[in-house]
Amino acid sequence: CAAEKSYCMAIQAEGMVEDFVSNMLNDNIELRKHCASAIFKCAQEEETRALVKSNGGLEPLVALIKDAENHGNKELMAAVTGALWKLSMSEDNVKCFQELELVPVLIGLLKDNSEGLDDLQFNLGKIQVLTNIVGAIAESARTHENRELIREQEGLAPVIRLIASTSPGLLVNVAAAIGQMAEDVESLEQSMSNPDPKPSGLVQIRNLDGVRLLWSLLKNPNDSVQAAAAWSLSPCIRNAENSGDMVRSFVGGLELICNLLESKDQQVLAAVCFAIANIARDKENLAVITDHGVIHKLARLAHTNDDLLRAKLAEAISNCCELESNRALFGKAGAVAPLVSYLTSSDLEVHRTTAAALHQLSKDPWNCVTMHQSGVVSHLLRLIGSEDEDVQEAAADCLQNIRKLALACEKFRYQ
């Protein structure tokens, strides 16, 4: 029943979450398994995750997974690891799990269960356990301390090895875990404090060929896998040294990612736009994707009402405008007027990326004319009063370019 959201809400309202937690301390292992499974299903909701923590439900779950005698019971492990994964979606719970030293246990289980990939495809119980473990590791890796722990415990190698599996759910979590670990970039401060450190998460990913394998997931027929892979590629590209050369080294990689802009899935489109925004930071790669028709493909997406896609699309357009000729191409492709309508959104991220895109596009005079005709001035005047300094600056710069064109036209008229 708990698989349905309406049932989850009813379970919360009736106070059943407290009963699940209290029964986790029962001696009956079957009862504990069902309670863990119910928590797994309900903990998608933030309120349930908070209730489990406040009622002391985290400690018995960690105790269950730490007990080596339970590791052979795959149904119990699937329920417990599933509950731990969903509960890790809350930052407060992750901090508590750090104190309970959960991550080393998860990595140990991951190493034990990820051997023999050929047999794994036919072992649905083990796939479910691995999906949950990797999901929990991905959520835990949102904190710097856990990323360091995963790196030190050599938890990346078994995660990357699982890219060879065929389970969509597992692949989504594997991509998410790699994406989080790509944020683990060694700083000068860290290298000075530890003269002989383990390579950073991103360096390990590159050494294990993780970026190329992640890129290969873009060919997966499952939309969720494609989206997860594209989201995770962005930190790999953004944080890597010589990322431009790395991206160009993947034969056919840029063409592949440009072709995904024809997907029908909103998450895939948003993720790919974000990846393109990061790829376009390198001038050579920007020239290549421009040759692959990225301008017209991005422009075709401009009439969307989805705020996530709007934010990432505007960022991609902004970065693609670093190539001067692309500004006019976006104008000819009809991308400018729809962007102006994005400023009616209430989403600050949409405002930030759209203002930046409009500023870049306003460097072309014909785009200024289109913006003015689309009523951009009143929106820009409002955004100058935004609390976000980036939005203020981009809006002011865009207005300045429009004003310069107007003054130049006025001067020409009276000559």
Image (cartoon, grey):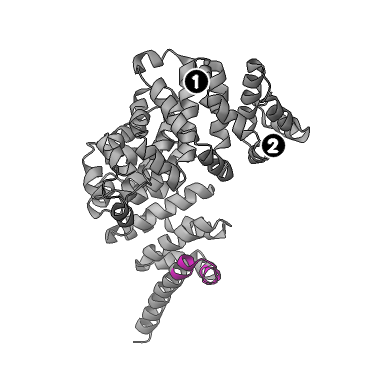
Nearer to me, 327 or 76: 76
Query: Where does label 2 land, which residue?
Result: 55
Mark 1, residue position = 68
Q: Residue placed at 30% from the left, 50% from the top?
A: 194
Residue 263 is situated, as x and y percent measured from the top left of the image, at 42, 36
Amino acid on which the number 2 mark rests in the picture? Asn
Left-right relation of 372 to 21 = left
Q: Position of residue 347 (x, y in %)?
A: 55, 56
Name the foreground residue: 211 vs 126: 126
Mark earlier in primary sequence (1, 2): 2
Is residue 382 rendered magenta in the image? yes
Asked if the magenta segment contains residue 134, the reply would be no
Residue range (magenta): 380-393
Residue drawn at x 40%, y 16% as measured from the top left = 120
Relative to 196, residue 351 above or below = below
Q: Secondary structure at mark 1?
A: helix
> Residue 149, relative to residue 320: is it above or below?
above
Q: Which quadrant of the structure image shows residue 93?
A: top right
Q: Nearer the viewer, residue 248 or 340?
A: 248
Q: Amino acid at mark 1?
A: Ala
